[in-house]
Amino acid sequence: MKTTLSPQAPSRSFWMVVLRQLRQDRVAMISICVLAIIIGAAIFAPWVAPADPFKASMLNRLLPIGSPGHWLGTDELGRDMLTRLMYGGRLSLLMGVVPVLAAFVIGTSIGLLAGYVGGRTNMLTMRVLDVFYAFPSVLLAVAIAGALGPGMSNSLIALTLVFVPQMVRVAESVTTQVRRLDYIEAARMSGASAFSIIRVHVLGNVLGPVFVYATGLLSVSMILGSGLSFLGLGVKPPEPEWGLMLNTLRSAIFRNPWVAALPGAMIFITSIAFNLLADGVRSAMDVRR
Amino acid sequence: MSSNLTDLDDSADRGGPAQPLLIVRNLKKYFPVRGGLLEREKKFVHAVDGINFTVAKGKTLGIVGESGCGKSTTARLIARLMEPDSGSLIFDGEGVGEFGGIELKAFRRNLQMVFQDSFASLNPRLTIQETIAYGPREHGLSQAQANERARQLLARVGLEPEQFASRYPHELSGGQRQRVNIARALAFNPRLVILDEAVAALDKSVQAQVLNLLQELKAEHQLTYLFISHDLHVVHYICDDVMVMYLGQVVEIGPVEQIYGQAAHPYTRALLSAVPSMDPAHRTEKSPLSGDPPNPINPPAGCRFRERCVHAEAVCSERAPALVPAAQLSGHLVACHMNDAASGHTAATLESAA
């Protein structure tokens, strides 16, 4: 950072500074590597996976970890665990990313408008959303998914609805803070339209904190998504998904506990990595104070 | 500097030199105070309570007073960042936002504001060039023209564009940031600039530099300043006229030398005697005023200053004094019964006889 005050300060965007800061954060970099491996394995599963995820074998049921040909053992139907974990990442990560992304877009828009307009509109919006807060998020997700019926897309919708109120609340509170600052008043003095003020002056300063919050939600979303699958409200068998695999392997927990714990370990590692990355991004964005 | 700015420049003098640039009439703003959920009776903070004043062209009017007396609210009302409850503004002879008068948008372009907190008044995500170019860009200049204008203005306020244009606010010092704010205010060729405690947060040496810059810019661009401050030394240095406010009302207004030399209102005298003296022999020993300003929710009837005034008499609680020309002082208005021989105040006849 010593170079930033050199006479010919080059034009640097905010996100470049954040990226540079992030690169010096070892924990965040390790998290990024872990996530890159998991996401890479999920994306390239058809080419990298050693076996067919749906091919069952009665002779090879519940092989332990380290068996020749099946490095991570096999499940209760004799399917290769490594393959199924790689394929399972596709749906599980989707469950993590899609609802958060959707809630990010919807929640930020609502929160931004409510916060900028203020007054009665704001109060009405926030009180309506408070109703959602009355329910624990797991219960709410189960209730909505249950009402919509089981299925992948329905559980995505359920998770999105669970996250929207939280996103709105974060976006609204940051917007309310930003709106009172003098640079917004100065922009109003210049006669700029409300749309332009929101786009240039509000959005840029609200997006950061909301983004960090959203990163933290990725792991929650994945766990909730797996939970829905575990309860039979999400993905249907034989489709591989970490939560669902955890459920079906439950019966084998006494015969082969290590294999049964593998999907749980994947959920754990991925969500920890997302959380540590979120922490890294948060502190990297604090450079300017 | 006006080569590519003709389309932004509507700063032509319309009313002639004798027409005051701004006339403020009966400006009022009460803020509602919310009690509990079930408390039906509404209360109001009388933030600005019917003030009248004029700002002459090319002059600097200082507004002084204690914290909470309504200085900044007055500024925001004039800038229309807040809607006044009542009152009117007349800008160079034209009613603001009135039929046949000047439109609000045009008025805003003629008036700009510099805020106290130099950091909060700059968007931390924009470089200072982007910040200054934003306004002109919004008014239809091309990006290149707006950038060119921003660079010219930066150079004018003493920040080398090559070195500073692409910096972010957190990379500048307080004085440099305030120069950026001034440059932004000048981007529209305004005629009236409201400086709301604009130098209060700067240390003394930087303050002097910025004040000198403001004086130069005023002469160059024929600006009129509304200078809000609680620093009476600075007001003495920069202002032509001074307006003293107390609890949302104007108590005295007059030329700076008369205010500092022959203040007619007891509150002004108390305010001025609270200024630390440069001479240790004339050290202020006792506090010129005791007590706090009364609650602005329920201001006292009659004269609002009477509870702290050593000259208070029965008449002061009966009638509120009007803002009238001071005896024997030209261009000087004061709201005090002692100034009015007909008020019945015992000191009134003495003062006017002296």
Image: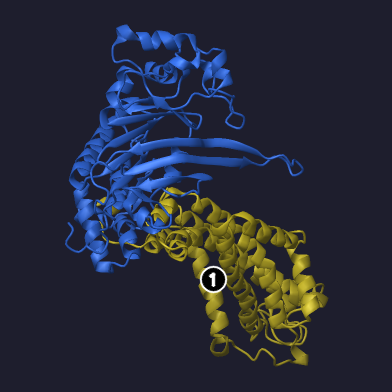
Chain colours: A yellow, B blue
- Residue nearer the viewer, B154 or B79: B79
The number of numbered discs placed on residues in the rendered structure image is 1
Provide residue B8's location: percent of width, then percent of height: 27, 61
In this rendering, is residue B289 above or below B139?
A: above
Q: How crowded is mark 1: few (under 14 residues within 10 Å), some or many (20 or more)?
A: some
For label 1, the SS is: helix
Q: Residue at the spot x=74%, y=92% of the render?
A: A57
Provide residue A18's location: percent of width, then percent of height: 41, 60
Provide residue A180's location: percent of width, then percent of height: 50, 49
As drawn, is A234 to the left or to the right of B345?
right
Q: Residue at the spot x=36%, y=18% of the render?
A: B327
Q: Mark 1 lies on which chain?
A: A
On the image, which quarter does residue A142 sit in?
bottom right
As drawn, is B180 to the left or to the right of A271?
left
Provide residue A166's location: percent of width, then percent of height: 65, 61
Question: Does the image show residue B124?
Answer: no
Q: Residue at the spot x=37%, y=21% of the render?
A: B326
On the image, which quarter does residue B58 sit in?
top left
On the image, which quarter does residue B102 sit in?
bottom left
- Residue nearer the viewer, B85 or B16: B16
Residue lying at the far front of the rendered structure: B342
In this rendering, is residue B146 above or below B196?
A: below
In this rendering, is residue B91 above or below A87?
A: above
**Which residue is labeled 1 in the image?**
A35
Question: Does the image show residue B143?
Answer: yes
